[in-house]
Image (cartoon, rainbow, N blue to C red):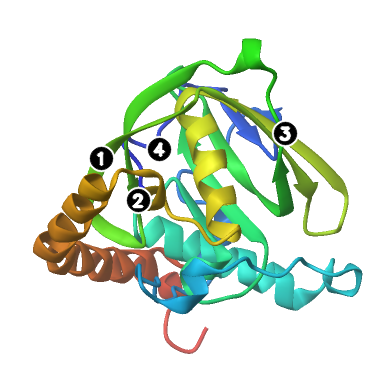
Amino acid sequence: MTERASTKALCGSVRVQGEWVAAYPEVPPEALRGEVRRITVVGEEVLHRRCRAVTDDEFGTPELSRLVDDMFATMWVAEGAGLAANQIDVDLQVFVWDCLDEDGVRHVGHILNPELDDLPSDARRLAEVDEGCLSVPGPYLELARPDFAVVRGRDLEGRPLVVEGRGYFARCLQHETDHLYGGLYIDRLSHRGRRTALRRMEDRKEKVFAKRAARAEELARLRPSAWASPGE
């Protein structure tokens, strides 16, 4: 999911894995550790089928930690608010987020095997807001979604995790969960809206790709290894 605002949050207004923390680096440490990967684009098969669940023997492994780091690095380069594993061509139910909501709260985290709660009718207030996607580079189109969401899953170690969000962060949680079930936001648009999104993508994607390449170079300069003198 693409970001609409700066990731700078109000002082002390940061939630990591759903819990309040005093502060969090503007460039997440996960992004500094990770490798930037290519983002898949609408039409690629991995985006259009349900991803497989993380199994018990995969929790807590270095491979899973590296995947989350790579996802944060890729999301940072693409200026995203969220990123699902199949957006870097990995068939696994994992997504990450670094999302600023309308109240100035920054939300950062990851979740595995996520499931959205079914909301009671009295909690389903729809908000129609522009939405975009890193796998549909360029366009934003209005889409109605509930303005509150609760997602349940596991963290990297397999511990139960519950995250809830309102407004734009709720949209992010829903958008990324959709990805892991093989859906994109444009699948929820009318036929006309989908055609518009794909046409605008073709017009804008090269500019988006160029910006991502520049951000990848910026991230490389920010990595600790870039600060060391030769021979250190």
Residue drawn where x is 86% and y is 57% of the image:
158
Picture disc at residue 186: 2
Mark 2 to mark 3 CA distance (whole Å):
22 Å
Determine which residue is flagged by label 1: 141
- Dot 3 or dot 4: first in sequence order is 4
Counting labels gives 4
Mark 3 and mark 1 in contact? Answer it, CB < 8 Å.
Answer: no
Name the kind of residue labelled 4 in the image: Thr
Determine which residue is flagged by label 3: 117
Q: Residue 67 lies in what quarter of the image?
A: bottom right
Q: Residue 58 lies in what quarter of the image?
A: bottom right
Judged from the image, the secondary structure of the residue bearing numbered disc 3 is loop
Name the kind of residue labelled 1 in the image: Leu
Picture disc at residue 7: 4
Name the kind of residue labelled 2 in the image: Ile
Drawn side of residue 68 relative to residue 31, left or right: right
Q: Residues within 10 Å of mark 2 (few under 14, many from 20)?
A: many
Name the kind of residue labelled 3 in the image: Asp
Mark 3 and mark 4 in contact? Answer it, CB < 8 Å.
Answer: no
Judged from the image, the secondary structure of the residue bearing numbered disc 2 is helix
